[in-house]
Amino acid sequence: MHYTIKEERLTADEYIEFLKYTDLGSQYPKERFYERIGTLVKQASISLVARNDAGKIIGVCFGITDFAYWLFITDLGVIRECAGQGVGTALVRKLHQLAGGEENIIMYTCFNENAYGFYEKLGMQKPNDVVVLNKAEWTNFTME
């Protein structure tokens, strides 16, 4: 499969449509979903989009970074029909490179337990040095 990865800002509608073809949509809370997705696509420090030769979005990766020390992968999704073909790995590697490279940047993410094997193959480990403050209202829902 041939595809290209570029820095690109999607609209909220484009991203929401993409989510319907991935398992990524279940990571978002129902509360103010459309408003918050609009903010996400506009504000992520790095926004990468993988497209096939026909121009169809097959993968997306967003990260927030200070470009000096830290990178947090906020979103990584690949359409179901392209899962397991290296698109996600290529997106993460490109994101890390754009943030400053693995020799400078520590990369973190929150993940679904089903995705841990993917991150483990990238060399990521579960940290024991992270704390969380979470007072956000969070109702799970499924993208359709």
Image (spheres, grey):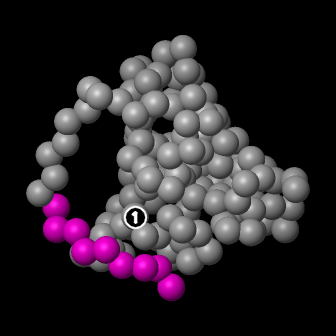
Residue at the extreme top of the image, as rendered: 103
Residue at the extreme bottom of the image, as rendered: 144
Q: Nearer the viewer, residue 144 or 55?
A: 144
Q: Which region of the structure is painted magenta?
A: 136-144
Q: Is residue 140 magenta?
A: yes
Q: Name the amino acid, label 1.
A: Gln
In which quarter of the view is residue 29 placed? bottom left
Task: Tell me the residue at 73%/54% (across/down).
Answer: 84
Q: Is residue 54 above or below residue 99?
A: below
Q: Is residue 8 left or right of residue 74?
A: right
Residue highlighted by disc 1: 27
Q: Position of residue 6 (x, y in %)?
A: 68, 47
Q: Position of residue 4 (x, y in %)?
A: 78, 50
Q: Position of residue 113 (x, y in %)?
A: 44, 53
Q: Is residue 49 visible?
A: yes
Quadrant the N terminus occupies = bottom right
Task: Tell me the residue at 55%/40% (across/down).
Answer: 119
Q: Is residue 63 left or right of residue 120?
A: left
